[in-house]
Image (cartoon, rainbow, N blue to C red):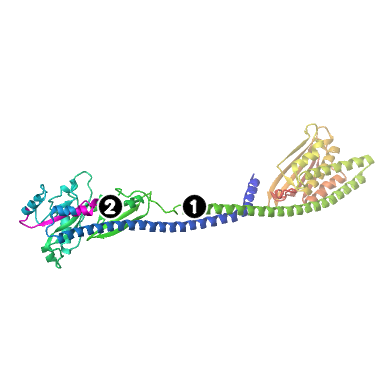
Amino acid sequence: MAIEVLRRIRGRILSWPSLALPALIVAAGLIMTGAGGYQIEQGRMARERLRFDGVVDQANDAVASRLDTYMAVLRAGAGLFAASKDVSLAEFRAFANRVELTRRYPGIQGIGYSARVLPGEADDLIARMHAEGATDFKLQNPDGEVHAIVFLEPADLRNAVAQGFNMHRFPVRREAMDRARDTGAPALSGKVELVQEVDRDKQGGFLLYEPVYRDGAVPAAVAERREALQGFVYAPFRAGDLLKSVLPSARRAGLDYAVYDGAPSTATLLYHSSGSFLGQNSLAATRKLDIAGRTWTLLYHARDGYEQGSDAGLTWAFLGTGTLVSLLVGFITWRQVSARLAAEREIVARIAAEAHQKLLLDELNHRVKNTLATVQSIAAQSLRHGTDVNSVRDSFEARLIALSQAHNLLTRDNWRGASLAELVRSELLPYGGANGERIGAAGEEVWLAPSTAVALGMAFHELATNAVKYGSLSGPDGRIDVSWTVTEGGSGRQLRIVWRESGGPVVAKPERRGFGSRVIVGGLAHQLDGVVDLAFAPTGVVCTIVFRLPPAGAEEQMLPLGSAA
């Protein structure tokens, strides 16, 4: 199990070179794609910001331009009063109708004239207005300095409620009126609630004033302007109506906006296009607008549905294409590297197979020579100790069969070696009885080198032959037990094999050693570089063989021919 795990790990390690270069190429491609995508996105965002700022600036300029237009209309109205010392209601209405306020200047609530009413002039003003047809005219809030609205066109329901209204009484309006009076220039008021707000849909409002002086000219000194002030041509505005008419393109382009009179706060909010800024879009801008002595703050914010440029999907297209190309190049590289490594492995395997084949041929040549020498030795010994032709032939054939048994085991495993247990069973199988009851073999799994297997096979054959002739197997009740153990020592692994005979006739030590004994004691000890002890105990022969084994796992390193390919 452990060896199989190690082989798998080795296989994965060997596959790393085929993955390293493709992975490096893919990683480099993805990094370059990411960097390129980042640059493209930064450039796209910069262009989007420029486009957004262009839309914002265009909207801001539209507000400023519209208010400049309104101031021009008020100057025209002031010119009417400068050209005529006594402008009647009919003349002012004709002027307002001629400039076509509702068609040409959407968003304006109207255009009017507020007269300065000096002490003692109120009754004359009321009588004059009644005479001109404004029978419902009266002064509203006539406290302090009075500036009453006498003309206001168009004469609709909203504007009708403002007739006679004293605007100077209220601080925000008064500040703008005094500023216009002292500067001789148009003045914009702060946020107010117009007196025209007569329904539930109330909006923040503001007023624009143009001063009118007696004799038409603007006096040079402030004191003279205060003395010569006649009144104001003015325009009231509902902020929502005005800004919706000025900035419809901003809404269509996906922008929300809010307009504040001064610093942004709830108290200074003139109008908000959507009530609040919603969505996750990061495009936002703040603009300041100086109008007739007041500073407006305009906040712009792109909604989630903001119309982006035609290159909005360019970054994702680049990232997708770059990723696909990187993976494709990495795949092609992997195929090429894999093919090259496979070719190299095939070459290496072929070289290894040829080297292994040569090694096998050399080994075969060596083993044939050794086998022939062994056969020659067996023949010589058989002839020397034989009493007749038949005995020589039987002894010679039996020893050749023992030799072939060991060779069969080795050939089956491509001469890598043989199992000790299989070697014992193959050599002693003919002597085991009907059911193998006369032979016992016990021990752990041990793998023997080829030369060791041949030597032990010959030794087991000689011991079995002697047991059949003179030992335990010569009687009906005798048996042979072969056991072995492997121990670890300072010099490495050591194998101890014990051949023990029992149940046979009483054993006596022979007066001389035959060929079998010399093969067992002398030849085996020399071939195994170990110790062989052959004891002739009365109860049966005991042969002990002790020698060193190669390191554990060494036999697994010997591969059969062709396995490298």
Based on the picture, tell me whether residue 231 belongs to the magenta stretch: no
Q: Is residue 555 left or right of residue 47?
A: right
Of callouts 1 and 2, the N-terminal one: 2
Query: Which dot marks residue 168?
Result: none
Mark 1 sits on what residue?
317
Asked if residue 227 can be seen in this view, the reply is yes
- Viewer-closest of 87 and 391: 87
Q: Amino acid at mark 1?
A: Ala
Give the secondary structure at mark 1. Answer: helix
The region drawn magenta spans 95-122
In terms of depth relative to the viewer, which is nearer, 522 or 348? Answer: 348
Image spot of residue 120 (x, y percent): 4, 56
Residue at x-position 44% and y-position 59%: 43
Give the amino acid type for the residue marked by disc 2 in the picture: Leu
**Residue 418 as seen in the image, left or right of residue 213:** right
User: What residue is shown with label 2?
Assistant: 243
Nearer-the-camera pick, 377 or 132: 132
